Image: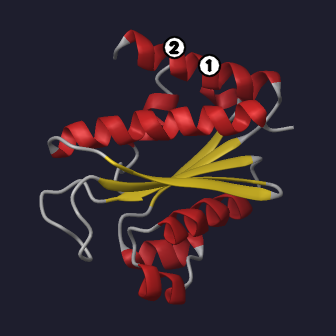
């Protein structure tokens, strides 16, 4: 793991511990990789509650409560779905913050959405922040870049919260 990634994970550990906050995740395209990064350093159990890998449409509905209408109208790779995933996992785990990610790592378009398109959302009491990004590279490169971007986004949201 690169020094910059480790430093970001240390900062996430620090801010969640110092503010006494709990975190949960809902991962689709990264399939648990972000969770693995968070627990790479010791002490994650002080703030990290759980992670749900919801790769399929059905798991997004059943495990996270993403509405069929959202999935039908916007698709699994959308900002609306990322928001619903984050909110669903936060409410089910009763954590202070939840991070979600959904996207297309490739190699082919999905739902007419190009390879590299990723949506990230962070849910917290009183709001949801989200954004879409496009990454280039191989499937693994996109997963790594998207995971790092999701952690940076989470840290940015938590940093200005409260």
Residue at x 71% of width, y 36% of height: 158
Q: Which mark is residue 11?
A: 1
* x and y percentages locating residue 149 in the rendered image: 45, 37
Q: CA distance from mark 1 to mark 2?
A: 6 Å
Residue 34 appears in the rendering: yes
Residue at x 43% of width, y 20% of height: 5
Residue at x 35% of width, y 71% of height: 56
Q: Would residue 87 appear left or right of 35 to someone viewing this image?
A: right
* x and y percentages locating residue 52 in the rendered image: 50, 56
Between 103 and 45, the residue placed more toward the observer is: 103
Q: Secondary structure at mark 1?
A: helix
Q: Quadrant of the C terminus?
A: top right
Q: Would residue 114 appear left or right of 23 to someone viewing this image?
A: left
In contact (CB < 8 Å): disc 1 and disc 2: yes
* x and y percentages locating residue 114 in the rendered image: 23, 63
Residue 43 appears in the rendering: no
Residue at x 29% of width, y 42% of height: 143
Q: Which mark is residue 128?
A: none
Q: Quadrant of the N terminus?
A: top left
* x and y percentages locating residue 75 in the rendered image: 39, 78
Image height check: is 18 above or below 51? above
Q: Would residue 98 appear left or right of 36 to someone viewing this image?
A: right
User: Residue at label 2?
Assistant: 7
Image height check: is 66 above or below 138? below
Image height check: is 48 above or below 69? above
At label 2, counting other C-alpha atoms closer than 10 Å, the crowd grade (few under 14, some 14-19, many 20 or more) is few
Q: Residue furthest right?
A: 162
Q: Would residue 45 appear left or right of 42 to someone viewing this image?
A: right
Q: Residue furthest top?
A: 3
């Amino acid at each position: 793991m690169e020094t910059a990634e480790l430093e970001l994970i240390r900062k996430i550990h620090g801010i969640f511990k110092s503010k006494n906050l709990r975190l949960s995740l809902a991962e689709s395209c990264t399939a648990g990789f972000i969770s693995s990064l968070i627990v790479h350093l010791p002490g994650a159990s002080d703030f990290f509650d759980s992670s749900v890998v919801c790769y399929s449409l059905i798991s997004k509905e059943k495990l996270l409560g993403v509405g069929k209408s959202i999935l039908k109208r916007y698709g699994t790779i959308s900002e609306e779905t990322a928001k619903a995933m984050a909110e669903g996992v936060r409410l089910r785990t009763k954590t202070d913050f939840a991070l979600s990610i959904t996207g297309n790592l490739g190699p082919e378009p999905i739902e007419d959405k190009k390879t590299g398109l990723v949506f990230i959302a962070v849910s917290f009491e009183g709001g949801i922040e989200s954004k879409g990004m496009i990454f280039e590279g191989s499937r693994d490169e996109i997963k790594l870049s998207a995971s790092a971007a999701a952690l940076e986004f989470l840290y940015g949201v938590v940093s200005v919260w409260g």
